[in-house]
């Protein structure tokens, strides 16, 4: 199971089907929450996850597709767009240090 | 083909007293509003329904953001946002939805507006203000504050206060 230490995270990708709606909103929240850390946050379609992504955040319903596209990435699935505990935890780990695993 | 519109929210795509009998009806109306401002082909609307069936676009606080699938992007002419308010509510797979933000995007013209929406939804008071806004100018100002502050209405003055023309 892939895992990564917070200090090695350079790029977080928020993926959804079209990269048009929900991923855009969540990416903007993450970008705000992580501003000040040198972590790039991008939003992309789930079938176009860039190779240099360190962590992939996507809706639980898309997790299987994300895993198929990017099997070696740490995957953080979420259920709700506002205040999902998985996303809150990810933000805390990035800020305070620690390990993120799939 | 027109470039990415600098202001994706065209006041003509804002309908604040809409009614829908079902979730799919609401989504189709959001799509029709995008069609009406020339942002999409009609075929895009079916992909909005497809997308909703795979994963709900309900984002919380009584707000949904219906949009098409990746395949549907080909039917998008320019980035655009429609805003439909359903004061009586729509049953969205068990969640009551009063506000739908319809999205058509092929570029990033809508990103700022969605960022603003995310910030609003994180604050229950601002979310309530958005849900209850029944004036087109107010909705535009809430979602695109940078345009509202300058208050320089575009040609024809569509950002001034006026009733939805229908």
Image (cartoon, rainbow, N blue to C red):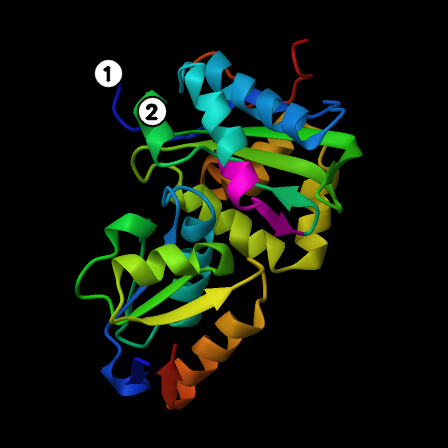
Q: Secondary structure at mark 2?
A: loop
Task: Tell me, yes or no, if residue B12 can be seen here.
Answer: no
Quadrant in which residue B161 is drawn: top right
Task: Using the rendered view, name the quadrant where residue B63 is placed.
Answer: top right
Q: Give the farthest residue toward the right.
A: B88
x, y percent for residue B97? 72, 40
Tags 2 and 1 on a common chain? yes
Please name the residue that numbered disc 1 is placed on.
B1
- First along the sequence among labels 2 and 1: 1
Residue contact between numbered discs 2 and 1, judged by CB atoms under 8 Å: yes
Q: Start and end of the magenta stretch?
A: B51-60
- State the image coordinates of residue A86 (x, y, percent, origin top left): 52, 73
In the image, B119: left or right of A57?
A: right
Split into 4 quadrants, where in the image is the N terminus of chain B? top left
Q: Chain of mark 2?
A: B
Q: Residue at x 47, y 33 (%)?
A: B103
Instruction: Name the residue at 69% across, 51% down.
Output: B61
Left or right: residue B26 compared with residue B144: right
Q: Which residue is mark 2?
A: B78
Q: Please say whether residue B57 is one of the residues in the magenta stretch.
A: yes
Q: Residue at x 39, y 76 (%)?
A: A102
């Amino acid at each position: 199971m892939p895992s990564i230490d917070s200090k090695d995270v350079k790029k977080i990708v928020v993926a959804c089907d079209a990269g048009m709606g929900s991923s855009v909103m969540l990416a903007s929240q993450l970008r705000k929450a992580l501003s000040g850390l040198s972590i790039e946050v991008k939003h992309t379609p789930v079938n176009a996850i860039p190779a240099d992504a360190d962590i992939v955040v996507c809706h639980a319903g898309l997790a299987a597709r994300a895993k198929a596209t990017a099997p070696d990435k740490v995957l953080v699935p979420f259920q709700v767009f506002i205040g999902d505990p998985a996303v809150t935890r990810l933000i805390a780990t990035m800020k305070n240090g620690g390990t993120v695993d799939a | 083909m027109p470039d990415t519109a600098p202001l994706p929210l065209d006041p003509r795509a804002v309908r604040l007293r809409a009614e829908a009998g079902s979730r799919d009806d609401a989504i189709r109306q959001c799509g029709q509003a995008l069609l009406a401002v020339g942002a999409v082909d009609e075929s895009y609307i079916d992909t909005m329904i497809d997308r909703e069936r795979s994963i709900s676009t309900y984002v919380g606080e009584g707000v949904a953001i219906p949009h098409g699938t990746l395949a549907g992007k080909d039917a998008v002419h320019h980035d655009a946002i429609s805003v439909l308010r359903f004061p009586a509510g729509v049953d969205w797979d068990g969640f009551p939805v009063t506000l739908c933000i319809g999205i058509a995007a092929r570029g990033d013209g809508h990103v700022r507006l969605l960022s603003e929406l995310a910030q609003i939804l994180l604050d229950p008071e601002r979310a309530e203000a958005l849900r209850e806004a029944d004036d087109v100018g107010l909705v535009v100002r809430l979602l695109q504050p940078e345009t509202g502050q300058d208050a320089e209405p575009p040609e024809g003055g569509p950002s001034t206060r006026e009733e939805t023309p229908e």
